[in-house]
């Protein structure tokens, strides 16, 4: 029996064979009704049968034998597009044709009683193989075009948003970067794809790589924040999400990520934090931040077995100056005094305004003669006249000093000791510094000679 005639007379059993195999290669987790699975199979078989029944010239046969036959818009092409849309893999789509080839030949041989094939039947088999190959080519071509269109659509959607969008492979190399990410990196796509965060000299690349590896290993999403330096002193903060890209079997084959610019929110948070922890008039740490930092310094000193000095400063004669020159001038005087105090200590030390005309300084890893030198410098700086416009203000400072761990081993006790020493300096006439002593009569007080 000629193969073309057999196919036309046995469409139903051939399609049933197709249905069985197609059901085994459907995307994992998806269900398809039989009508969708066999979508264009009837038309594909009819086109193949028509091709077998058609007279074929020698030049046409030679072209088809090397895959150069005409590729019209056919049912096979439509099938490839629909399989791509439905989420089938290219291998699964091609495998369907291999199953079709095997099923048709097997059913034909069974119908022929498995008799030896004639020369004409051999030619039919050769042409059938060429027709299947032609259908595969048409299907693969449209499958690829559909996937390319899907990718362009995907890229257009992700590139229309200011959010960063990207995918990386299992080795952390970029396989996709949307327009926003390309512009942020200042690189064309060909300079990004195939590169890792480390290759692109991205900040905290090692941390990002570990987090991506964690997503791959746990098969779970991961969140985080990332700071991107645009230029020295200019940063952008991003809140990102990394999610696993799973195969049909549920294993991770890639990681997809998206990141949203949250710089404005971070700036607002920083401003709020500054306002909550710094004195609005002088810019120094306020009482709240001072207490937290002092406690941290004490814990640090305990761990390392080191020491620190806590210096309390109360401005002498500030009230008189404030009453004489006015509150606005008094605010200026406080700001100028705070600036002088800050200039007397290291960047690692902590200067704070506790309120009114009371200030404090935490001198880390400093004691003995070093503390005396800093305290004397503070005293002299405050004793120098302050120019308030056309007026000159003269004030001084009463300074109390407590040493950790000699005088106290907790932050609370250290504050009490420094305050006690400051009061001793004040009672002694001010414009001097005093070290804490549990017996006021034995306080070590140093004044201007």
Image (cartoon, helix red, strand yellow):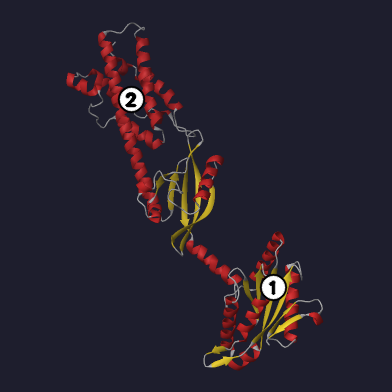
Q: Nearer the viewer, residue 77 or 333?
A: 333
Residue identified by numbered label 1: 310
Residue 152 image point, x, y percent: 34, 45
Q: Nearer the viewer, residue 307 or 412?
A: 307
Residue 202 image point, x, y percent: 46, 53
Q: What SS does tag 1 mark?
A: strand
The answer to whether residue 386 of the structure is visible from this angle is: yes
Please determine whether, in this image, residue 327 is positioned above or below residue 20: below
Q: Quadrant of residue 18?
A: top left
Q: Nearer the viewer, residue 359 or 322?
A: 359
Residue 79 image point, x, y percent: 34, 31
Residue 33 image point, x, y percent: 44, 30
Residue identified by numbered label 2: 42
Residue at image location 60% in from the left, 74% down from the top: 345
Task: Characterize the local packing of mark 2: few (<14), some (14-19) or many (20 or more) Cα atoms within 10 angstroms.
Answer: some
Is the C terminus in the top left, top right, bottom left or bottom right quadrant? bottom right
Residue at image location 68% in from the left, 68% down from the top: 294
The total number of labels drawn is 2
Q: In whole angstroms, how far apart are the C-alphas of marks 2 and 1? A: 90 Å
Which mark lies nearer to you, 2 or 1? 1
């Amino acid at each position: 029996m000629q193969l073309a005639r057999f196919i036309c007379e046995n469409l139903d059993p051939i399609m049933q064979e197709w249905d069985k195999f197609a059901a085994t290669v459907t995307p994992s987790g998806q269900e398809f009704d039989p009508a969708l699975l066999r979508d264009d199979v009837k038309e594909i078989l009819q086109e193949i049968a028509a091709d077998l029944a058609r007279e074929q010239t020698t030049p046409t046969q030679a072209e088809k034998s090397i895959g150069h036959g005409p590729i019209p818009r056919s049912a096979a092409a439509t099938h490839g597009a629909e399989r791509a849309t439905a989420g089938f893999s290219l291998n699964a789509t091609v495998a369907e044709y291999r199953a079709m080839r095997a099923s048709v030949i097997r059913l034909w041989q069974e119908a022929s009683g498995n008799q030896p094939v004639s020369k004409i039947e051999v030619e039919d088999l050769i042409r059938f193989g060429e027709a299947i190959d032609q259908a595969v080519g048409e299907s693969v071509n449209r499958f690829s075009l559909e996937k390319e269109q899907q990718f362009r659509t995907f890229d257009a959607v992700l590139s229309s948003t200011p959010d960063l969008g990207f995918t990386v492979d299992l080795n952390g190399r970029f396989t996709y970067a949307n327009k926003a990410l390309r512009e942020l990196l200042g690189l064309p796509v060909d300079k990004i794809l195939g590169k890792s965060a480390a290759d692109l000299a991205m900040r905290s690349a090692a941390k990002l790589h570990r987090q991506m590896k964690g997503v791959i290993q746990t098969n779970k999403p991961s969140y985080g924040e990332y700071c991107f330096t645009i230029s020295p002193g200019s940063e952008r903060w991003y809140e990102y999400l990394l999610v696993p890209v799973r195969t049909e079997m549920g294993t991770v084959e890639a990681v997809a990520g998206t990141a949203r610019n949250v710089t404005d929110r971070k700036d607002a948070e920083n401003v709020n934090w500054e306002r909550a922890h710094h004195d609005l008039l002088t810019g120094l740490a306020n009482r709240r931040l001072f207490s937290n930092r002092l406690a941290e310094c004490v814990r640090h000193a305990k761990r390392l077995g080191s020491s620190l000095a806590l210096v309390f400063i109360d401005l002498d004669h500030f009230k008189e100056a404030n009453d004489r020159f006015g509150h606005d001038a008094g605010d200026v005087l406080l700001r100028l005094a705070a600036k002088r105090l800050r200039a007397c200590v290291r960047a690692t030390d902590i200067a704070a305004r506790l309120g009114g005309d009371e200030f404090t300084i935490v001198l880390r890893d400093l004691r003995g003669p070093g503390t005396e030198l800093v305290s004397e410098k503070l005293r002299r700086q405050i004793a120098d006249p302050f120019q308030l416009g056309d007026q000159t203000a003269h004030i001084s400072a009463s300074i109390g000093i407590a040493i950790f761990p000699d005088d106290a081993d907790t932050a609370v006790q250290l504050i009490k000791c420094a305050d006690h020493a400051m009061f001793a300096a004040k009672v002694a006439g001010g414009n001097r510094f005093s070290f804490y002593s549990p017996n006021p009569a034995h306080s070590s007080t140093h004044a201007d000679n």
